[in-house]
Image (cartoon, grey):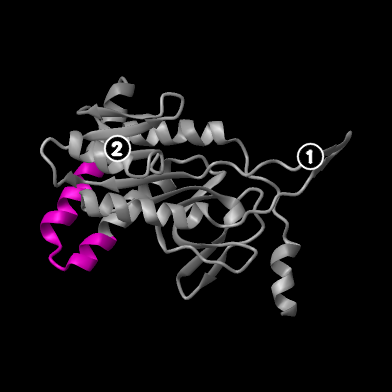
Amino acid sequence: MADWSLKTLLEGLHDVIHQKLETARKTIVHPGSKGDASEKIWLEMLQTYLPKRYQAEKAFVVDSNGVFSQQMDVVVFDRQYSPFIFDYEGQKIVPAESVYAVFEAKQAINADYVKYAQEKVQSVRNLHRTSLPIPHAGGVYPAKPPVKIVGGILTLESDWTPAFGKSLEDVLKFDLGCLDIGCVAAHGYFLFDLPLKQYQFFNGGKPATAFLFQLISQLQYSGTVPMIDVLSYFKWLNK
């Protein structure tokens, strides 16, 4: 039997994603179609490699007050404990309580797109989220505070040289910590260090694979989403 190499497997994951993004960029002429292709590549990676308790889709997010977020290119949400997702003619709508992470996907990172991603992430974080006490065999656990929603940006290239220089750091600081993680597949990835209140930048390597593992780690620390108050959504049937 042939010998396996974990290093080769992990590097190969990045190489496949990078090549798909490059191919979409070079071969698709229409900007909208090119953007759709890039979003699909990132989505397919997360749909394939995230643990099955999570689901990833392009979606809107809604809260029990009837407020909707902007449409997010990637929404990572719970499907184990969240009771529903609306799917109408291909338009998916996810309840705010079920959301773990949201991402904006673009061809390249620049100041305008970072600010746009920050705005879209905040449109999700600003939504109201319910949380009910959790019954168990020995009694009732108190209602769990909603988890922090991870926000980020995913791109192939950067409009800056160097990709991870002062220009990127300055625009990220404009809304400090709003974007927790970002991947620029051709150059590297970045993370917001919450205890230090600063960004860390990682150049080179295999960024798509590194991003995936860092995201999974952040999701693990998020734990499980709160128990949704389904009846707070049901009330809209009587309005």
Q: Are marks 1 and 2 in contact (CB under 8 Å)?
A: no
Disc 1 secondary structure class: loop
Residue type beneath disc 1? Pro
Q: How far is disc 1 from disc 2 in space, using C-alphas?
A: 38 Å
Whole-percent x, y for residue 201 in the image = 27, 29
Residue type beneath disc 2? Ala
Disc 2 secondary structure class: helix
Q: Residue at x 36, y 29 (%)?
A: 198
**Residue at which label 1 appears:** 142
Whole-percent x, y for residue 115 in the image = 30, 52
**Residue at which label 2 appears:** 208
Crowd rating for badge 2 (residues with CA inside 10 Å; few <14, some 14–19, many 20+): many
Q: Residue at x 71, y 80 (%)?
A: 239
Work out which quarter of the rendered image holds the N terminus and state it. top left
> Does residue 164 appear in the picture of this structure?
no
What main secondary structure does the magenta stretch of the protein show? helix
Residue farthest to the bottom, as pictured: 239
> Does residue 163 appear in the picture of this structure?
yes
Mark 1 or 2 closer to N-term? 1
Q: In the rendered structure, which segment of residues is drawn in magenta?
A: 17-36
Taking 234 as reference, is 159 left or right? Answer: left
| Magenta span includes 128 | no
Taking 158 as reference, is 232 left or right? Answer: right
Q: Nearer the viewer, residue 183 or 24?
A: 183
